[in-house]
Amino acid sequence: MNTQAQYLKAIYLVQDQSDGPASTGDVADLLDVSPASANEMIGKLEDRGLLEHEKYKGVDLTDKGIKQARDALQNYCIIERFLVEVLEVEEFRTEAKQLEGVIDETVAERLDTIIDREPQCPDCFSAEEDVCGLLETEAEVISD
Amino acid sequence: MSLQAPIASDHQLTRLLQIGVVLEEVVEARSHKHAQASDEPLDPAVAELLDHAVAESADHRQRLERLVEELNADTVPFDDIETLVEAQYETDEEFDGILYDQLCNEETAYKFYDDLIEAIETSEVEFSIDRERLLTVLKEIREEEAEGVEDVTELMEDHG
């Protein structure tokens, strides 16, 4: 997943949690980058028609931005689920974050052919828990 | 969440190599399944392509497994992945579907190794495995995947 996709996913999740525009500070926090870096990338994404940025209000993804963000989130869900179901990784959240920059969407699609993923994905993703709401239950069962 | 793409540890490298092994196992199992699942006798050129894909994936997998072993880790056994592939496999694969799936397999593997090589090259971590040898193995495999993409594309054009 490239940097643009990771930003779109983060903005989508922050918007989901705040139920409105995402503050650039929250986006920077979630990505663990400086506010200056976040502002620079947000400017680029605005130029590409993926979001609208209003000073003092925050960032709103456009329809095009939402679609790309949801694809990125779905790829991330595939990585998490693959780590749990196939490789049986306990620290799957941490590892998924480390891997998402190296796992391209075409690779994620292939990994998707051997995992069980619910049709409502990525709507079942919990921004607060940072994991698929349905996977959480299964992960707990595995660790029991 | 991190925006760092380079690989920061032996552990991350191992995990990516393990994913590579699974990808090869998926290719091997799906190619094998394609060859078996067709009711009609397969076009000899397609049958040969699938045989070659099965053998090549098994070879790539074994080369990756040796690297993972050197990093003191295990990989997922082929039988486990074959079972997962079986469980999700669509039985009504058409001829074009088989070739298209093979193309996806080869392209995906190429992209995976390409990204992995780039991530290793941009990483400043000293791995416990020899970096040059690691990169040589991965680049050889990437080259073979690129040839695989060409082979499938040619076959698709011949049948187009």
Image (cartoon, rainbow, N blue to C red):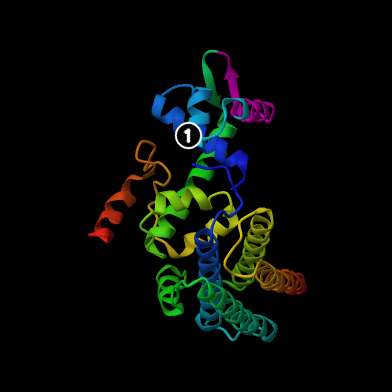
| Crowd around label 1: few <14 · some 14–19 · many ≥20 (10 Å) | some
Q: Position of residue A79 (x, y in %)?
A: 47, 54
Give SS at disc 1.
Answer: helix
Left or right of B102, for residue B151: right
Disc 1: host chain = A
- The residue carrying mark 1 is A30
- Residue that lies at the very extreme toward the top in this rendered image: A56
A115 up-or-down from B71: above or below: above
Left or right of B95, for residue B37: left
Taking depth in this image into account, of B90 and A108 the one nearest to the observer is A108
Identify the image quadrant of residue A141.
bottom left
User: Which residue is pictured at 41% across the width and 71% down the height?
Assistant: B84
The quadrant of the picture occupied by the C terminus of chain A is bottom left
User: Which residue is pictured at 68% across the width and 29% down the height?
Assistant: A44
Q: Position of residue A43 (x, y in %)?
A: 66, 25
B16 up-or-down from A45: above or below: below
Q: Position of residue B6 (x, y in %)?
A: 61, 52
Q: Let me know if residue B132 is in the magenta part.
A: no
Callout count: 1
- Residue that lies at the very extreme toward the left in this rendered image: A144
Identify the image quadrant of residue A53.
top right
**First to last magenta residue range:** A38-55
User: Which residue is pictured at 55% across the width and 35% down the height?
Assistant: A8
Q: Let me know if residue A45 is in the magenta part.
A: yes
Q: Position of residue A131 (x, y in %)?
A: 38, 45
Taking depth in this image into account, of B37 and B111 the one nearest to the observer is B111
The residue type indicated by label 1 comes to: Leu
Taking depth in this image into account, of A49 and A101 the one nearest to the observer is A101
